[in-house]
């Protein structure tokens, strides 16, 4: 025979035996019913809190190992959580150390690049200064200071015009 809520109310009003009173609290077979008898009571709030905790434990179990069926043993779930958190802390520390080393290496490489670039620029500057000095000093007999300049058509024209000017001034 199944009891419904009206039967439980009548049993509690009549003041039936302890067994029937227990049926009112727990349901027909000793299991709690899905909803609380009075939603605002302390017992109902406690039951909701326990249900939420159990749901969170199940969710945590699934998050820790999504490929396995969720564990129901709270102690095992917490052990797994501790293990995973410690493992992630170790990995985070390793990544921070690696990041720091890479940043130092980048700084070192930038310094080396800048040194090399500075040397190249310095050499280019000295080379240009030498070229400028050789162009400023006229070579004897109007000979070009650079051997390749004698074969360059533009420089040859320039040389011819400068010779012509020199002859006209005399």
Image (cartoon, helix red, strand yellow):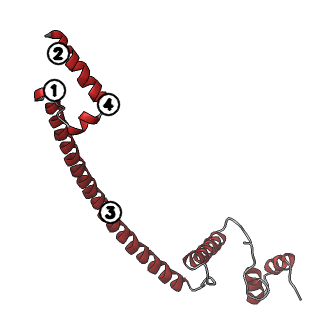
Residue that label 4 marks: 153
Expressed as whole percent of the image width and height from the top left, the position of residue 115 reads 21, 51
Return the residue nearer the eye: 65 or 4. 65
Q: Relative to residue 65, is residue 28 drawn left or right?
A: right
Q: Relative to residue 169, is residue 47 drawn left or right?
A: right
Give the spatial CA distance, label 1 vs label 3: 59 Å
Give the spatial CA distance, label 3 vs label 4: 54 Å
Q: Is residue 1 visible?
A: yes
Residue that label 3 marks: 102
Q: Relative to residue 21, is residue 53 drawn left or right?
A: left
- Among the two numbered marks 3 and 4 on one chain, the one whose residue lies closer to the N terminus: 3
User: Looking at the rendered structure, which numbered label has been put on residue 166?
Assistant: 2
Residue at 79% x, 79% y is: 12
Q: Which quadrant of the figure has residue 121?
A: top left
Residue that label 1 marks: 142
SS of the residue at dot 1? Answer: helix
Q: Which quadrant of the figure has residue 104?
A: bottom left
């Amino acid at each position: 025979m199944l009891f419904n809520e009206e039967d439980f109310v009548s049993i509690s009003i009549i003041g039936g035996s302890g067994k029937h009173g227990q049926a009112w609290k727990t349901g027909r077979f000793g299991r709690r019913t899905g909803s609380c008898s009075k939603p605002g009571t302390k017992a109902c709030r406690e039951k909701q809190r326990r249900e939420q905790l159990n749901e969170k434990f199940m969710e945590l179990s699934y998050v820790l190992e999504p490929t396995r069926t969720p564990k129901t043993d709270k102690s095992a779930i917490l052990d797994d959580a501790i293990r995973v958190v410690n493992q992630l802390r170790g990995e985070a520390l390793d990544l921070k150390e690696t990041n720091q080393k890479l940043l130092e290496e980048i700084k070192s490489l930038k310094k080396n690049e800048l040194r090399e670039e500075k040397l190249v620029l310095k050499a280019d500057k000295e080379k240009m200064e030498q070229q400028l000095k050789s162009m400023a000093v006229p070579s004897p007999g109007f000979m070009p200071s650079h051997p390749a300049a004698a074969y360059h058509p533009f420089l040859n024209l320039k040389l011819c015009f400068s010779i012509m000017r020199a002859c006209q001034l005399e």
